[in-house]
Image: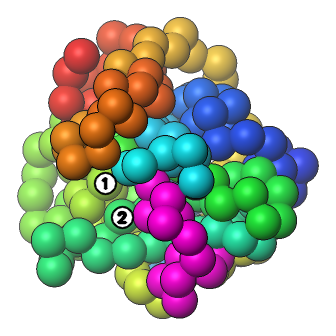
Amino acid sequence: MKLSREFYLRDGLTVARELIGKKIVTNLPEGVTSGIIVETEAYMGAIDAAAHTYRGKTERTKIFYGAGGFVYVYLIYGMYICTNVVANVENVPEAVLIRALEPVDGIELMKLRRGKNNLRGLCSGPGKLSQALGVTKNLYGADLCGDKIFIEDGEKLPVLTTPRINVDYAGAAADYLWRFIAANSKFLSKHA
């Protein structure tokens, strides 16, 4: 069953933790693809020097300032799309980066999109999973309660916390335990 808007209208840390074990689905013209979310990171707005909204609202981050349950996508290193879930209520700019998935549906399409056959590495990073799911900049602002991209309920998995990855620039925020991983998953972007 697709998650309701209420799921996303909570703080980013809660949403990030509870997304572990849920299934993200893309339903695009080329086909349906999905994966179990096994790794997330929370980004907590004005209190978080690693968040895109730390210094306030910009044209790129305006989606954060609406209600939770929408998609925020951005480009890193000039070539990789990152898929994020906007969390919390209007004017509380928090989001959750989806960092890794265990592929479930449409695996052959995922392999084709990525040009890779290694199942363990297919969605083991934010750029990889976005490419495998067919997520592009066109999904910026997509409603997760809609039909193109959505998240379904899943099973509860044991969750571990670690510091986030590649946020060394964020001072003390680099050490916050705001990365959530499914314990014992072999599909993580980086093992704890």
Secondary structure mainly formed by the magenta segment: loop
Q: In which quarter of the image is residue 118?
A: top left
Give residue 37's position: percent from left, percent from top: 48, 39
Q: Which mark is residue 82?
A: 2
Q: Which mark is residue 126?
A: 1
Residue 74 within the magenta-colored segment of the rendering:
no
* Image point (89%, 49%), residue name: 6
Q: In this view, does 77 lie to the left or right of 11?
A: left
The answer for how far apart the CA atoms under marks 2 and 1 are is 5 Å
Residue 63 location, quadrant: bottom right
The amino acid sitting under disc 2 is Cys
Q: Is mark 2 on a helix, strand or loop?
A: strand
Looking at the image, residue 170 lies above or below residue 55 = above
Amino acid type of disc 1? Pro
x and y, in percent, of residue 79 in the image: 16, 77
Whether residue 35 appears in this view of the structure is: no
